[in-house]
Each structure stands twice: as C-alpha cells, then as structure tokens.
Amino acid sequence: MAGNIADWFGQHLARPEAVLYRQHIGDGWRDVTVGELTTRVARWQAAFCRDGLAEGDRIALCGRNGLEWVAIDLAALALGLVVVPLYVDDNPENVAWCVGNAEARLLIVENRRLASGLARLASAERITLPPLVVLRSDDTGDTAATTVEAFLPAEHPPVEIRALPLSALATICYTSGTSGRPKGVMLTHGNIIADVVACRGTGMARPDDTFLSVLPLSHMFERTGGYYLPLSLGAKVVFARGVMQLADDLGTQRPTIMFAVPRIFERFRARLAQAVAGSRLKSWLFDQCVVRGYRLAQGTASLEGCDSVAVGDALRLTDEAGRRLEATDESEIVIWATA
C-alpha cells in the first residue's frame, strides 16, 4: 500500500487561492495561499534535486515554526527524503551530534548565529558538517553559510509528490538528551498517517477550525496535531509569534484549537483566576465553567438547552454553601443544562 504524508498537501493544489496558513510578517499578519506555498515547495524541491539528494537521504532542519519550515518539510517528504527536525534553541554541540548521527546530507538552520557556532565547533573539534543553509540572513554572524535565496533556484518544475510505501522512513526525531546523548526515533510515513487518521476519527477538528501553532514543529506532538492534522482537513494554521505574545495572538487570531503542554494551560488558569479573584461571583462562575467544561469534554454534560440570561434583580445566585452571590455590574451568565 502506498502513502506519502505530502499527499495531504497535494489534495489542495487545485485550490491555489485557498488559505492554509497565517503568519506575522514585518508589522502585521498575512495570509498565505496554497499557490504561494506551492511555489516555495517547488523551489526547495528543485534545489534538493540539483544537489543530488535522493530518496532516503536525510536533511536536518533547525528552524522556527513558520511557512519556510512547512515548505521544506513538504518538499522533502514529497521526494522521499527524510527530515531530521532539531530544536532551534539547542546548543551547537547537540545539533552537530544529531546531524552526524543521522548522517544528514544538508543542514538548514534558522540564523547566522547558530551557523557561526556550528562552524566554530566544527573547526575546533575537526567535525565535518554537511552544507549549511541559513534561513534568516538579517542577523549577525561570521559564517560563510549559503543564504536561502542564494540556495533556491528561481526556475523550477511543478511540485512532485512520489508514491511511497507506508514503510518508507519519513523522519528521525531526537530526544532532548537529558540522560545522555540524544536518541533518534525513526518514524515512517505509515506511522504518522495512522496517527493523523486516528485523530480525525475522534472528531476533534473540522475543516473550518483555526489552529494556533505554539509548540515547536520539531516536537512530534505539534507536528502531528498542529500541522499534519489541519493539513489533512484543509483547516487554517496561524503561527504564534512566541510565548510572550501568546495572549495577544489568542485575542487577535481567535483560534479554535491549540495543542500545548500542561504548563501553558496552567499559566492560563492562574491568570484567569487572578483576574476574577476580586469578585466572589466571577470566581464562582469561573470555577463552574471549569467543572462543566471538563464534564463536557468527558461526554457527561451537554450544551442542549443552554440559554443566556442577564444578571440583575430578577436573578439571585448562591454558591454551594448557600451564600448569596450579587452581581456588581451588568453581566451575562450562561446557564448550562447538564446531565
């Protein structure tokens, strides 16, 4: 049975005007169409083929979430290349070790600072690194690495998506290395496709959802749920600017789905709890929302019969201890009909 992860991208090629991604570029947010992404994927494929990369060859990618990361990944997977994602904030020693262990034939890094650190390490330790390509050349660094625009040819053939067996290797993901050298986990196209199909089977996402990409794409949790899943559905992905701007991005982009680690959600809860701490009514309502939201997620509650009522003299609420809760301003309370 054949299967290529990039087939999910291929299903959108007939809709070049469709928007799959949104990214903050310069001073504002910009939608990215299928047509724009297709051009970028085709240029990367032309560069890979020009340099003689063949099916099964590994390319190491150490970049931040964004359109370029997606374009490189899709271009490589579609040709049967193996993507080795690395963490952009890792130290040069770990990056160099993973690149060597994976036997990568090309290394793509985010900026000149990392490229310079790798070049110095290679010189000092007499390490042989593969050719280096830098995605962002607007920062400082004294490396002679190739810039992305110099690496990508202007002319290119159409995007090619090859039929691959499900057993074909798609990626090698490395552990953090906290207990020794990082260990590479080998995942096939079939492995990842099965995970995405299982996610779709839960009904957790729809084509009209908007995803906010927060976790690094070098992590398979984000890569599977926050990238391949929406790609398979045709849902839009917004790339968050960073943790410091996360609150603003949530407010302005209004995503419906976000994959994140518990620590991020714990911060959300702490900030919300702090915001309502001055009002017993608001605190009670917040706690009730948390309880009922959990029940809703577990399938033991329903939104059927949900109604909205104004808080005023006509409505009196009490907490579980029977204490009366007074509204201090005109608010809205959602009355949940729960089983």
Image (cartoon, grey):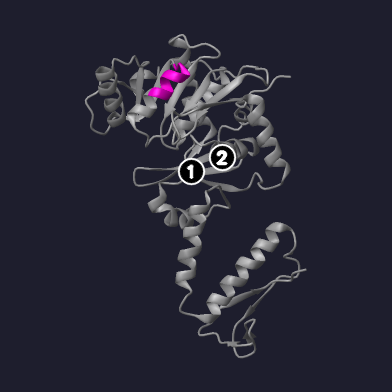
| Disc on res. 58 | none
Q: Is residue 241 left or right of residue 254?
A: left
Q: Pick out the residue farthest to the right.
A: 339
41, 229: nearer the viewer: 229
- Across and down, in percent, residue 43 comes to 45, 20
At x 56% / y 87%, what residue is drawn?
326
| Disc on res. 215 | 1
At x 49% / y 36%, what residue is drawn?
217
Q: Is residue 172 left or right of residue 124?
A: right
Given contact means CB atoms under 8 Å apart, are the residues at marks 1 and 2 in contact? yes
Mark 1 lies on a secondary structure that is: loop
Q: Residues within 10 Å of mark 2 (few under 14, many from 20)?
A: some
Mark 2 lies on a secondary structure that is: helix
- Across and down, in percent, residue 262 comes to 53, 52
Our reading of the magenta stretch's main secondary structure is helix
38, 227: nearer the viewer: 227
- Across and down, in percent, residue 241 comes to 41, 46
At x 42% / y 34%, what residue is drawn?
87
**Amino acid type indicated by mark 1:** Leu
* Residue 177: quadrant of the picture: top left
Q: Which residues are magenta?
A: 97-104
| Disc on res. 221 | 2
Q: Is residue 103 magenta?
A: yes
- Across and down, in percent, residue 121 comes to 28, 23
Q: Is residue 118 left or right of residue 318?
A: left
**Amino acid type indicated by mark 2:** Phe
